Image (tube, rainbow, N blue to C red):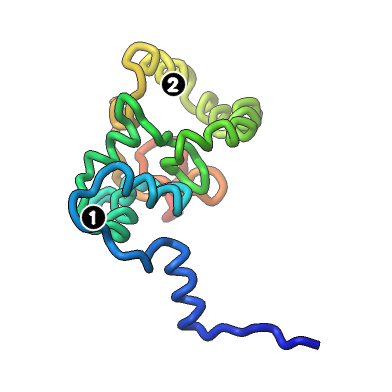
Amino acid sequence: MTRPETLSAGQARRIALAAQGFAEPRPTGRIDARHLRRVIDRMGLLQIDSVNVLVRSHYLPVFARLGPYPRDLLDRLSWGRRAELFEYWGHAASLIPLSLQPSLRWRMDVNRFRENGWATRMSERRPGFLDEIRELVRREGPIGAGATGEDRPTSPVRCGTGTTARSRSSTCSSSAR
């Protein structure tokens, strides 16, 4: 019988950090879209969170791996005319490489027709709201959530099953309750 290999906590930690790209040296010189693509490819996605104590959280993983970089590069890859990332609920609200979108279509289709899904609950709580948003997107093209005119988040609330959002909306209940 062979003895299983074991790792110390330090070895396991170094392996995990290396797998996330922290063992690679930071690039020297000008950081460009190739560098950002490499980071995102390695991580698979960037989680979006509107909390911005320092900066919006999706900028931080790239900074941690590349050092200072032009944030507008990530903005262009995410929301520019030739975006390479799209917003989707991958693990949480995330920026995901557009190349993965076909692999997620099945999930999008399943959720589109769920009778107990978010869209159904939203339609019941705010009749006409989704039609208003669809019309806004038809008229304006791709937009960020801030372009909807909805109030900015102010307090933590719990929505659905296990997801946390910040909103004043009556569609969710306060986490303090």
Which sits in the foreground, 97 or 116?
97
Measured Cα–Cα span from mark 2 to mark 1: 30 Å
Q: Secondary structure at mark 2?
A: helix
Q: Secondary structure at mark 1?
A: loop
Task: Tally the numbered discs.
Answer: 2
Q: Position of residue 132 (x, y in %)?
A: 41, 16
- Frontmost of labels 2 and 1 is 1
What label sits on residue 16 in the rendered view? none
Identified at 39% across, 13% down, the residue is 138
Which sits in the foreground, 20 or 58?
20
Which sits in the foreground, 41 or 114?
41
Q: Is residue 155 above or below residue 113?
A: below
Q: Amino acid at mark 2?
A: Phe
What label sits on residue 129 in the rendered view? 2
Q: Position of residue 57 (x, y in %)?
A: 31, 51
Q: Is residue 44 left or right of residue 113?
A: left
* Residue to which mark 1 is pinned: 53
Q: Position of residue 85 (x, y in %)?
A: 41, 36
Q: Is residue 46 left or right of residue 32?
A: right
Q: Is residue 171 above or below residue 66?
A: above
Q: Position of residue 170 (x, y in %)?
A: 42, 36
Which sits in the foreground, 146 or 40?
40
**Could you say which quadrant of the image residue 142 lies in?**
top left
